[in-house]
Image (cartoon, rainbow, N blue to C red):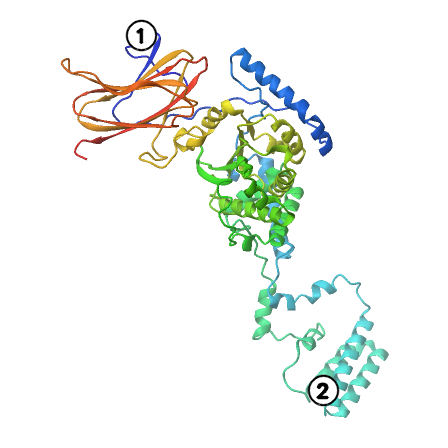
Amino acid sequence: MADQVQVGAPPADKVVVVPDVPLAEKPPVAAAAAKEPPPVPESEEELVKQKQVEDAEALETKISDAVADGDDEEKVPQSGHYKEESTRVADLLENEKKAVEELKVLVREALNKHEFGGFAMPQQQQQQQPKDDSAKEEPKPKAEAVTETVAETKEESIAQAETGDDEEKVSTATVRSDAVEDDGAKTVEAIEDTIVSVSASVQPEQPPEAASKEPSDAKPNVEGKDAETVSNKVLPQEVSIWGIPLLADERSDVILLKFLRARDFKVKEAFTMLQNTIRWRKEFGIDELVEQDFGNDLEKVVFMHGFDKEGHPVCYNVYGEFQNKELYQKTFSDEEKRQNFLRWRIQFLEKSIRKLDFSPGGICTIVQINDLKNSPGLTKWELRQATKQALQLLQDNYPEFVARQVFINVPWWYLAVNKMISPFLTQRTRSKFVFAGPSKSAENLFRYIAAEQVPVRYGGLSKDGEFGNTDAVTEITVKPAAKHTVEFPVTEACLLTWEVRVVGWEVNYGAEFVPSGEDSYTIIIQKSKKVGCSEGEVVCDNFKVGEPGKVVLTIHNPTSKKKKLLYRLKTMPASA
């Protein structure tokens, strides 16, 4: 952020005058341009291990060269810019609109034919489906088919005769059967006479099998349950995904767009991906999984916190938590535990997705922050396998749900990890990646997330206390070997409260009240002192003002590095 304008101060100092009115929100900071790393061919695990040391030395050399040059900019490869596309069909190109309509046609046909695997049809519909299976068989000659029908009728008649039915009627069925073979023209008439004569001596109710064996010329009885069955037979399959019924409304178009974009608008490939995802969700038991209780052991490993500048919810993945050996063993020590971790991670994602807005133009993606500080790294085979499996599942079944992937506190071994997972990611996915070393992590986060939304542990001011996530923060860059002054003018008696933070600190901080009256004296609120990087992440202070004047905060940066200053304030009337 550019330095603010000087007001009444020597050239060596920077002075900021803050009006005693609510601070307006600052415009978003444009994301810095990022360069895409060269493509890396997929390699065997053994080759990755052999090249770890070489890659580490190369990256450390680049970092040391950058520091020697004085720009403190780790030469960490970054992928290119990614700009999120519109979710409104009206905003699409013509060929993209056509692809959406073609995919909707395929989905509608699949729903009508019940082709989405893994979803059972109602029982009544299943009872009325024998024609679907028989249609696959070769058609039989008419005479042979009719003969089999009559033969089956004869067998039923004989069975009824054994229980006391009229033997004469059974013999009539036999004669009719012989007549069919001699004279095919009278076949249908003979069958009707036979069925009528046989059914006259039995109870009115017929088993379902008999109804299905009636010839096509016979008029079906569509009363009662049969009428309900006929109506159920034509109902299309109902399939929902992430709580959105397919083809039910405009939200379904947003879902289909995700699959199309994941497959570069290739309709057949997108449809296949959708089918596979629906099948996998059924096999994995997603609906039941969402209701499971996995405990709270991993709540510090993955958590949601705040929103980015565009309104996307932000998810933090803290790999350093697995430095805890007890937690690591409890999570990854055997295959069953690794699968349980995978199910927990899918459950967490499912719950987060179902809170998104799938209406056209709504926020339906998430920003992922991956903190690699103190991460176990490549030496932990179990973590590596679980991560690889999770990435594959997410890419195959959760298309276009990540607006941006930001990697912070990237250590030397990150390059080897990037090489390992890159072959499993599409170019579109890789374009969303942003990497930052330890000294640039906070700065990179502030490009996409306002400081009031970033947790204190990552350089922001978001925490429990008097200020909330809606209280805007002002960001100032303090140049090397420079002094920066911030003034809070006060015109009436009040209680002034403020929060100040310098990312990385190692600067001198002081505060004083300068009254407007000539006969008044300056009051020292905080004597200037050096604040180290480990001494309190956020300074919270207040001062009760009894006369007009101004509160002046002074930040002196004696180092050779730029520093990021964050502050915000609020006033309360003295009567309160």
Badge number at residue 10: 1
In the image, residue 79 sits, relative to residue 366, either above or below, namely: above
Badge number at residue 197: 2
Q: Position of residue 46 (x, y in %)?
A: 73, 32
In the image, residue 43 sits, relative to residue 557, either above or below, namely: below
Mark positioned earlier in the residue sequence (1 or 2): 1
Q: Position of residue 11 (x, y in %)?
A: 34, 7
- Residue, far right: 182
Crowdedness near tag 1: few (<14), some (14–19) or many (≥20) residues, C-alpha within 10 Å: few
In the image, residue 556 sits, relative to residue 242, either above or below, namely: above
Badge number at residue 142: none
Q: Tag 1: residue type? A: Pro
Question: Which residue does the image show at 66% across and 23% down from the upper left?
Answer: 55
**Left or right of 227 in this view: 216:** right
- Residue, far top: 11
Question: Which residue does the image show at 53% across and 18% down from the upper left?
Answer: 73
Secondary structure state at the residue bearing disc 2? helix
Residue 424 visible, this angle: yes
**Disc 1 vs disc 2: which is toward the camera?**
1
Secondary structure state at the residue bearing disc 1? loop
Q: Position of residue 165 (x, y in %)?
A: 72, 91
- Whether pointer 1 and pointer 2 mark residues with C-beta atoms closer than 8 Å, the reply is no
Q: Tag 2: residue type? A: Ser
- Residue, far front: 326
Of residues 268 and 234, the one drawn nearer to the viewer in this rendering: 268
